[in-house]
Amino acid sequence: MLYSAPVIVENIIKDSEKDKKENVINKIDLSNTLFKLIDRNKEDKLVNKYQKTQSKKALEKLYEIRKQTLQIWSRKYSYLRASEEDLLSDISIVWLKCINQYEYKPKKRKVRNKKGKFIFKKNGKIKTILKRTPFNTFLYTSLIHYISNINKRQHGQKRVDKDGRPHESHLISIDYEYDNNNDSRKLCLKDMLVSQSPGPASKYNTDSMIEDISKGDSEVKDALVRFTSDSHIKKISNACQNISEKITVCRKDAKIFRGHKGTAKKRLKQIINESNKYSKGYRLLNFRFDDKNKTVSFDVKRKDTAVLRKTIKALEKYKEKMEMETVG
């Protein structure tokens, strides 16, 4: 049901906006609008009915109840998106997901006092009570988390540089022109990247660019080579953090890797820890055992971000160099 959320929400908005004054959301003056009180018990029952019957009429009624809420949120946080309509569309999808994921049946919950401490029974066990979370609470919590996540994505410390600018502003467009001479054809980044059937000129251009960016740093060079050669790597961070390795194991360990996968994974982690190669931590992504050659191939994501920082710095310097050459 969730995969068709944008289509359903769009249809509801089109069907529900019958009044011409409400067709353009930007023209709605929320400060002078009278809002209807919401019957929360009725809304909870409607959500439960929709989950059981998948009735479009029930969904339209739910939208009519919550339309004013969604409009308020889209107006209040419109600065987070390109337009108010974009944010309204996004939070409408959040609203629809809440309808599908809401649990109407009451659950056992631990009882707390006004200070937030648990209340105990005479036998020493924590007192429990059957309680149902109202849909209103579930919806508002989801909307708060959604808005908070947008803020973190845009203003998080890891996503901005030392000047407070997002890293996206440093990314070079695939149509960025490296050679803008009038007597030669324009050379773009997409012409320099390795294609599915690269020729000698394309590979030479890519290798030259990598050498120019890395400036002899082997770690930066290896990361850029992985990024340009492996079609499965979509982000430069994965090229810097994800490492593929292969080790040869003894006969005793080979028996372990032939057996239960969980035991094999535990033994592989012990081998990696003993090597002390990833002192700042790592996460084992996957591994494969070759019984014929008694080798284990595995991928890890290291937590050390030193290579990533160096690569981003090298790319920024290369971008500044290209911009200076273009201006010159």
Image (tube, rainbow, N blue to C red):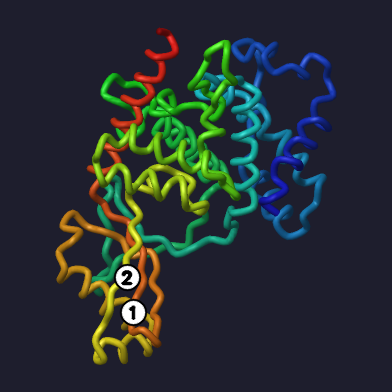
Seen in the picture, residue 170 relative to 208 is either above or below; the reply is: above
Disc 1 marks a residue whose amino acid type is Thr
**Residue visible at 33% across and 61% down in the picture:** 300
Disc marking residue 246: 2
Seen in the picture, residue 248 relative to 55 is either above or below; the reply is: below
Task: Tell me which corner region of the image, top left, top right, bottom left or bottom right, holds residue 313.
Answer: top left
Badge 2 density bin: few <14, some 14–19, many ≥20, Cα 10 Å: few
Q: Is 31 on the left-hand or right-hand side of 289?
A: right
Disc 2 marks a residue whose amino acid type is Lys
**Residue visible at 60% across and 57% down in the picture:** 104
Q: Secondary structure at mark 2?
A: strand
Q: Residue furthest top?
A: 328
Seen in the picture, residue 56 relative to 127 is either above or below; the reply is: above
Q: Secondary structure at mark 1?
A: strand
Q: Which residue is labeled 1 in the image?
A: 295
Mark nearer the N terminus (1 vs 2): 2
Q: Is 193 on the left-hand or right-hand side of 35?
A: left
Marks 1 and 2 sit apart, C-alpha to C-alpha, by 7 Å
**Residue visible at 40% across and 7% down in the picture:** 328
Where residue 287 appears, as percent x and y from the top left, is 38, 72
Between residue 225 and residue 3, name the one nearer to us: 225
Where residue 324 appears, as percent x and y from the top left, is 37, 13
**Residue visible at 51% across and 30% down in the picture:** 189
Q: Is the Cβ of the residue at disc 1 closer than 8 Å to that at disc 2?
A: yes
Between residue 314 and residue 110, name the one nearer to us: 314
Badge 1 density bin: few <14, some 14–19, many ≥20, Cα 10 Å: some
